[in-house]
């Protein structure tokens, strides 16, 4: 065990395990070029066998992609499934955060040493406290472009299935999906708008044989305990009546910027929440990027 500090100077410990360790993930013994050693930081018990699903996707997702990454991750986490991803900005981050917000388990696989996670931010700190970071790279190794395709084979190798949420036609997420197919893992893809570039990667995977998925239920039934009874709440049921956005729009029609100012949230934080409410038919997007209550069920 080695004591070190995170990017904010807070102490944490990291350990290494080898292929002969009792806690070594058996699934990694059967992938191309299995690593000789793994470094772990955070809740090291999360390396133990468990149902796992990888959620990967664009580093620049649309608000729809952000909301869906969070939706699927939270549903999986509540079903006892561990979320695996790459800690990158975008879909990866929303998946990790969704799992943690649901009180679930999540593993971030790095393209650097576990003491040099990238990107650095509040999510990294949460992962060290509530989740698990792992890497095959020695401590001190900094992120490099060539490391990430290599890292992707571990994301799929650790998982029972891989879900891709928004990806461009040429995307690193497709590398993970192709690794998964080669490793005998099931690959699922979330469809999107036919005229949006962030849908092209998922639609390409579906044409190549990935399973189209619209709800977490199908994957939960395939990966989790088959006796687990999952019933996804309707979008409207998942929104509390005291939601601050709904309260702010009571009797008002506001722009995203106006809502951002009133709720003291950045627009990047706010947009996925607005999309979630729009999908739940609680608010309506009016012309000019304005938002108002739909008065659905009120």
Image: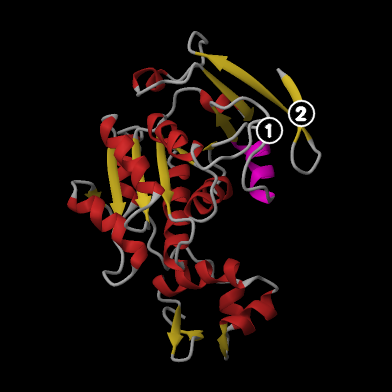
Name the quarter where the N terminus is drawn. Answer: top right
Q: Is residue 230 above or below residue 277?
A: above
- Residue visible at 42% across and 29% down in the picture: 158
Mark 2 near mark 1, Cβ–Cβ under 8 Å? yes
What percent of the width, then of the height, locates residue 284? 44, 83
Pick the front one: 279 or 93: 93
Who comes first in sequence, dot 2 or dot 1? 2
Instruction: Name the outermost residue toward the right.
Output: 9
Pick the front one: 22 or 199: 199
- Residue visible at 42% across and 78% down in the picture: 297
Q: Is residue 64 magenta?
A: no
Q: What sort of colour scheme is used for the picture?
A: secondary structure
What percent of the width, then of the height, locates residue 78? 47, 44
Q: What residue range appears in magenta?
A: 122-131
Pointer 1: residues within 10 angstroms few (<14), some, or many (20+)? many
The tally of labels here is: 2
* Relative side of 109 to 216, left or right: right
Q: Is residue 294 above or below residue 222?
A: below
Q: Spatial distance from mark 2 to mark 1, Cα to Cα?
A: 7 Å
Secondary structure beneath label 2: strand
Pointer 2: residues within 10 angstroms few (<14), some, or many (20+)? some
What percent of the width, then of the height, locates residue 263? 67, 75
| Magenta residues, dominant SS class | helix
Does residue 203 appear in this view? Answer: yes
Residue to which mark 1 is pinned = 115
Numbered tag placed on residue 162 in the rendering? none
Residue to which mark 2 is pinned = 4
Secondary structure beneath label 1: loop
* Relative side of 12 to 81, left or right: right
Does residue 84 appear in this view? Answer: no
Q: Is residue 4 above or below residue 69?
A: above
């Amino acid at each position: 065990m080695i004591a070190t500090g995170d990017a904010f100077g807070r102490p944490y410990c990291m350990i290494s395990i080898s292929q002969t360790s009792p806690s070594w993930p058996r699934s990694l013994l059967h992938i191309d070029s299995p690593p000789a050693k793994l470094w772990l930081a955070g809740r090291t018990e999360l390396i133990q066998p468990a149902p796992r699903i990888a959620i990967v996707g664009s580093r620049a997702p649309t608000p729809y992609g952000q909301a869906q990454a969070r939706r699927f991750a939270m549903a999986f986490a509540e079903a006892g499934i561990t979320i695996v991803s790459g800690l990158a900005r975008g879909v990866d981050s929303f998946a990790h955060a969704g799992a943690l917000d649901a009180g679930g388990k999540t593993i971030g696989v790095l393209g650097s040493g576990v003491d040099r996670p990238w990107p650095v931010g509040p999510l990294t700190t949460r992962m060290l406290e509530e989740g698990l970071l792992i890497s095959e790279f020695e401590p001190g190794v900094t992120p490099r472009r060539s490391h990430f395709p290599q890292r992707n084979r571990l994301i799929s190798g650790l998982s029972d299935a891989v879900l891709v949420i928004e990806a461009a036609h040429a995307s690193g997420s497709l590398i993970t999906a192709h690794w998964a197919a080669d490793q005998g893992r099931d690959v699922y893809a979330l469809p999107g708008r036919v005229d949006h570039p962030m849908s092209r990667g998922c639609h390409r995977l579906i044409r190549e044989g990935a399973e189209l998925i619209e709800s977490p239920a199908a994957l939960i039934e395939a990966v989790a305990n088959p006796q687990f009874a999952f019933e996804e709440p309707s979008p409207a049921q998942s929104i509390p009546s005291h939601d601050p956005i709904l309260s702010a729009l009571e009797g008002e029609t506001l722009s995203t910027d106006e809502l951002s100012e009133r709720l003291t949230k950045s627009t990047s934080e706010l947009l996925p929440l607005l999309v979630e409410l729009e999908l739940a038919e609680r608010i309506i997007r009016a012309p000019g990027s304005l938002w108002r209550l739909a008065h659905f069920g009120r």
